[in-house]
Amino acid sequence: MSSVNTATQAATRQVRGLLGEKVGMTQTWDEENRLVPVTVVKVGPCVVTQIRTPEKDGYSAIQIAYGAIDPRKVNKPKQGHFEKAGVTPRRHLVEVRTSDASSYTLGQELTADIFSPGELVDVTGTSKGHGFAGVMKRHGFHGLRASHGVERKHRSPGSIGGCATPGRVFKGLRMAGRMGGERVTTQNLTVHAVDAERGYLLLKGSVPGRRGGLILIRSAVKAKAKGAKK
């Protein structure tokens, strides 16, 4: 029954979204003169390039585009797609599911002012790539002892399984491997300030990704549950 309610809420939820680039981190102060670490994100302007409807597509959503690109680098199908929306070609496309998709129009421009200070948002980006990393860096292992018989294996994981029983390594065991470069979403970040003229959002805390990386900002999916009592 709970899964049905969750699906119903998702179908009726109004979501606002913007694409942008991570500028970097800085610090500012709030009304009570407390230091606040913030991440500066350059968002928009984004344009609506497609509107999904339940009658035609089976769900309600909008497609937004962001970022300038040389039209010569856009293939014919995408050129026709942008011409149909009445906009110039853009580099990035993303779809945002929202119940009020019918209130948008093709070619509509979306800027930073669709969000307001104090609002909670979810931020999605690609985490920094660290290449092949060991277990201490990748998973926070303590490593082996620094003395008393330990050879040059101080950053090793230690035993990864028994010899005869179970005679194999269990799936999902935390080991060394490629770290980062994955899609990561940070939930319930607070919009500290909005600079609509220059297109900047100041988000309290850190967001995933490197400076200059592509960022997707959406209305928080768990905003109501953040302050709820357990």
Image (cartoon, grey):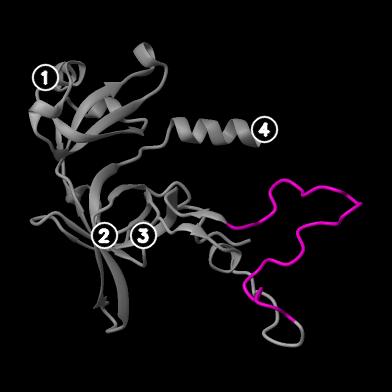
Q: What amino acid does circle 1 point to?
A: Glu
| Cα distance between the residues tagged 3 and 1 | 34 Å
Label ID, residue 211:
2
- Comparing marks 1 and 2, which lies closer to the viewer? 2
Looking at the rendering, which quadrant does residue 116 occupy? bottom left
Query: Which is the main secondary structure of the residues drawn in magenta?
Result: loop
Quadrant in which the C terminus appears: bottom right
Residue at the right extreme of this rendering: 164
- Quick one: SS at disc 3? loop
- Identify the residue position indicated by label 4 in the image: 1
| N-terminal-most mark, 3 or 1 | 1
Image disc number at residue 26: none
The residue beneath circle 3 is 207
Q: Amino acid at mark 2?
A: Arg
Q: State the CA–CA distance, disc 1 to disc 2.
A: 32 Å
Does 167 sit above or below residue 104?
below
Left or right relative to 71: residue 161? right
Local secondary structure at mark 2? loop
| Residue 116 in sight | yes
- Which range of residues does the magenta coloring cover? 150-176
Q: Secondary structure at mark 4?
A: loop
Q: Do the numbered discs 4 and 2 sit on residues whose CB atoms are within 8 Å? A: no
Foreground: disc 4 or disc 2: 2
Q: Where is residue 192, by image quadrant?
A: bottom left
